[in-house]
Amino acid sequence: MPSRRTLTLAAIGTAAGLLSGLFGIGGGILIVPLLVLWCGFGERLATGTSLAAIVVIASVAAAVHGAYGNVHVRDGILIGVPAVVGVLIGTELQQRISTKAISLVFAALLAVVAVDLLIPG
Amino acid sequence: MIEAVAIGLLAGVVAGLLGVGGGALFVPALTLGLGLSQLDAEATSLLAIIPVALVGTWRQHGHGNVDLRTGALLGVLGVGGAVAGAAIANAVPQRALEVSFAVFMLFVAWRVARRALRADPPGPATASRAPAPP
């Protein structure tokens, strides 16, 4: 009989995996808050642990999509490798500047892209 | 090729700044920037996420911020969901995928904005609102 904690992690993992495979994301947007709320993790520990889970989840989802022939390997590498450099820069900048304005601009940008997708044609 | 590198770099900076995984940025960057279909952009985004998450884990582990056992367990327990999610993405009509992705993006936008607006006054009540586990 699996423990209550294992069942909780299975629920989080399954939901994150579904989102990941369905939408092409890592799933951190779901994993981080649920680790905090359901498992009592601190924000930092939740973020780091989420990254480790994403390595596995994204690899599996990418492999399945690869089997369907959807993955553009060259584009993925061309974007993924510079993104690593970008993340290191971004993490460093985060310690120095206020991210509030950037968060709001980012949220607005996502909303615009979403609305653009929703309008047909 | 230069577009792809620039998009990756920019998406990485924003991801690092805001702590939001690159995926929510990679997908629209791939559709709008490189002209991929929604399905192919999602699949390619997943490949791009792997090195980012790997390096992120390594860096955070150095700061003692990774519970590797829980992370690995979460990942393994997420395999079924990931396979199912990818299969569903391939089974539904492209338009349905676009619409559901757009709705999900609105959710992400709402969360990011709410967190940004809440970050200023650190309310003491935030820790106490823990809903019951499922």
Image: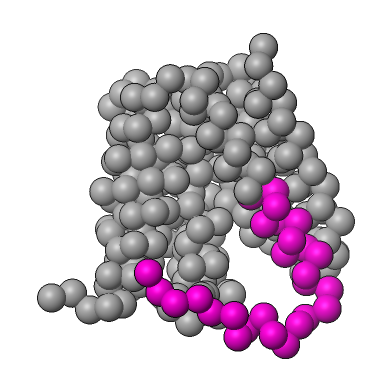
Query: Residue at horizontal 67%, vertical 57%?
Result: B111
* In magenta stretch: residue A27: no
Rendered position, A15 above or below A82: below
Q: Which residues are magenta?
A: B108-134
Left or right: B112 with respect to A45?
right
**Which residue is nearer to you in this view: A108 or A82?**
A108
**Which residue is nearer to you in this view: A82 or A20?**
A20
Rendered position, A84 above or below B123: above
Please state the horizontal and vertical placement of residue B90, each as a whole percent of the image: 36, 25
Please state the horizontal and vertical placement of residue A63, each as a whole percent of the image: 32, 36
Left or right: B90 with respect to B10?
left
Please state the horizontal and vertical placement of residue B119, each as a whole percent of the image: 78, 71
Rendered position, B72 above or below A102: below
Q: Quadrant of the C terminus of chain B?
A: bottom left
**Which residue is nearer to you in this view: A76 or B97?**
B97
Query: Residue at horizontal 27%, vertical 58%?
Result: B76
Query: Residue at horizontal 31%, vertical 77%?
Result: A5
